[in-house]
Image (cartoon, rainbow, N blue to C red):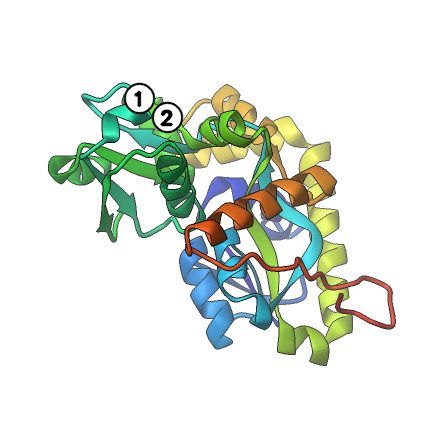
Amino acid sequence: MRVGQTYFKNTDFIYYAIQEGIIDLGAELVTAHPPALGEMLLRGAVDVAPVSSIIYGQHPEELVLLPDFSISAFGETGSILLFSDDLASLGDLEGKKVALPGTSATSSVLLDILLREKEIGAEFVRHPEPDLRAMLRGSDAALLIGDHALAAKGEGRKVLADLGEEWKRLTGLRMVYALWAVRRRFAEAHPDEVEGLSERLSASRRYAYDHFREVAGVLATRLGISADAMAWHLSRLDYSLGTENRAGLEGYFALASKYELAANPRLEFFRLCSRSRLG
């Protein structure tokens, strides 16, 4: 089995015990950014991966979800940020250029939804690399996510908006940025392997929460930010997929569908310890 992991420290949190050899995942780890992992999952280069949520909304017929894993938040996270040297609010983006990084899929669509709902017309410009200085040379604002957003904020770069907070104000819902998705064909052919993987991921997540300050400190050192900043960021995240997170995900897909950015799929989960594994 080939299992995806991202380059971002917020995913390293849930994989920490696996990366440190404390828990044996029993699978090959493949590292890429979330949009790339989504593409790899769809073409069969990996079997399970944390992918941008929008990937599931665009390909629900090919994927099923692990039932209790996500990267979600209610409000600000400090890691899904729109930067600008000159602008002060989303309303100032009318008629302006916004640079989007190749590392983002869900958050790029989220920004599109927010601006459409607020009737703000902006032009999106794609950048393959999340280089803030290069992005702002040709645009009025730039979106960064994950480590790149945390690092830029730590350097004191001016934040125009935290998209998680903007989503909360607009909808009152939680925002689900990433989902652990499984290729449907793989889940059907290897249900016991998927169930075992889910158990080991759960154990790794428990370890991270049981050793929260230690893990946050290590990840902060790797990124080059303060331990307190990393601990605050990780404390804002929810790695489960309970009722409130699912409601937020459904709200996101509803608005993405409204603007023809994705489907509005029924959430279909791999069922643990059940004869019927999909549903």
Picture mark count? 2
Question: Spatial distance from mark 1 to mark 2, Cα to Cα?
Answer: 7 Å
In this view, the residue in front, 241 or 258, is 258
Residue 242 relative to residue 230: left or right: right
Which of the numbered marks, if any, corresponds to residue 255? none
Look at label 2 and name its amino acid.
Answer: Ala
Look at label 1 and name its amino acid.
Answer: Ser
- The residue carrying pointer 1 sits among few (fewer than 14), some (14 to 19) or many (20 or more) residues within 10 Å by Cα, namely few
In this view, the residue in front, 153 or 173, is 173
Which image quarter: residue 232?
A: top right
Residue annotated with mark 2: 161
Residue at the (46%, 61%) spot, across then down: 37
Residue 26 position, x and y percent, is 67, 66
Residue 270 relative to residue 49: left or right: right
Which image quarter: residue 135?
A: top left
Residue at the (63%, 73%) spot, across then down: 184
Q: Circles 1 and 2: CB distance less than 8 Å?
A: yes
Front tag of 1 and 2: 1
Residue at the (61%, 56%) spot, across then down: 180
Residue annotated with mark 1: 89
Residue 175 relative to residue 194: left or right: left
Disc 1 is placed on an element classified as: loop
Is residue 8 visible to the viewer in this orientation of the structure? yes
Q: What is the quadrant of the N terminus in the image?
A: bottom right
Q: What is the quadrant of the C terminus in the image?
A: bottom right
Disc 2 is placed on an element classified as: strand
In this view, the residue in front, 101 or 152, is 101
Residue 117 position, x and y percent, is 41, 36
Residue 187 position, x and y percent, is 69, 73
